[in-house]
């Protein structure tokens, strides 16, 4: 997927430009909510974004107990067919549940990589784990995934689900979008997702 991910985290304006609904945990979750990074194509079309719940992950050295952070992040990916790139010189891949799984998996890695690891080894570790996350996202019917059914807008919805030492990742689809999610120290079991009626409450 052709994306740029430099859109400011926490800025609601870009989210309001999306032509698809955003999803988060339903109103049973009463803790903090925040906006993650937004992804857009070269022509500025919003393609995906993340809504966070709980602690906002931080890898800063001064962060208190980063391994004890408790969060769940819902990734919404626009349902896009195979299409021409904005400059007409190439073709952009269609989005899929694998797209959501990849974004969720890479999001979990960026939020939870080992802070105590020697700095010189971190990039090699991240490259290796990112490659593994991509391979897993491309094999959703493989042994690395199990099935989990959760409510989405009140309807039972099937997700591909996996756990690791860093947290959990899941991916599925809803009306007009693909959904991914990742979390740590907050169980995926018992969660429910819903379209967000008013993004203003997420403005940082």
Image: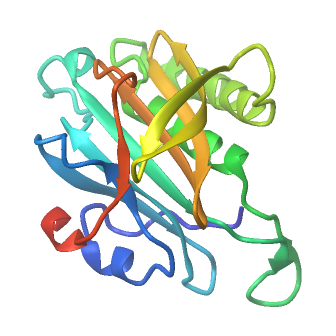
Instruction: Identify which residue is drawn at 60% across, 67% down.
Output: 176
Whole-percent x, y for residue 104 in the image: 53, 40
Q: Is residue 20 above or below residue 117?
A: below
Q: Position of residue 152 (x, y in %)?
A: 44, 48
Q: Is residue 139 above or below residue 156?
A: above
Residue 6 percent location from the top left of the image: 44, 66
Residue lying at the far front of the rendered structure? 155
Quadrant including the C terminus: bottom left
List x then y, in percent, for residue 7: 40, 69
- Answer with left or right where residue 128 lies relative to residue 148: right
Residue 90, picture quadrant: bottom right
Q: In this view of the protein, which residue sits in the foreground, 12 or 192?
A: 192
Q: Is residue 132 left or right of residue 19?
A: right
Q: Name the side, left or right, on which 29 lies relative to 169.
A: left
Residue for point 11% across, 40% down: 31
* Residue at left offset 54%, top offset 84%: 44
If the image is split into quadrants, where does the N terminus sit? bottom right
């Amino acid at each position: 997927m052709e994306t740029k991910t430099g859109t400011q985290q926490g800025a609601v304006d870009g989210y309001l430009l999306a032509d698809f609904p955003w999803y988060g945990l339903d109103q049973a979750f009463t803790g903090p909510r925040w906006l993650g990074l937004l992804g857009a194509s070269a022509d500025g079309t919003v393609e995906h974004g993340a809504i966070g719940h709980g602690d906002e992950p931080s890898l800063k050295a001064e962060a208190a107990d980063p391994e004890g952070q408790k969060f769940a992040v819902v990734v919404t990916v626009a349902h896009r067919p195979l299409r021409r790139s904005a400059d007409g010189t190439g073709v952009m891949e269609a989005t899929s549940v694998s797209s959501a799984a990849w974004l969720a998996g890479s999001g979990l890695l960026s939020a939870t990589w080992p802070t105590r690891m020697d700095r010189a080894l971190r990039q090699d570790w991240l490259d290796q784990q990112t490659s593994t996350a991509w391979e897993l996202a491309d094999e959703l019917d493989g042994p690395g995934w199990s099935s989990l059914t959760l409510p989405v807008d009140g309807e039972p919805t099937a997700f591909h689900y996996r756990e690791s030492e860093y947290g959990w990742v899941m991916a599925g689809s809803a009306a007009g979008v693909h959904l991914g999610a990742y979390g740590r120290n907050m169980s995926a079991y018992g969660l429910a997702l819903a379209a967000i009626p008013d993004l203003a409450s997420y403005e940082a």
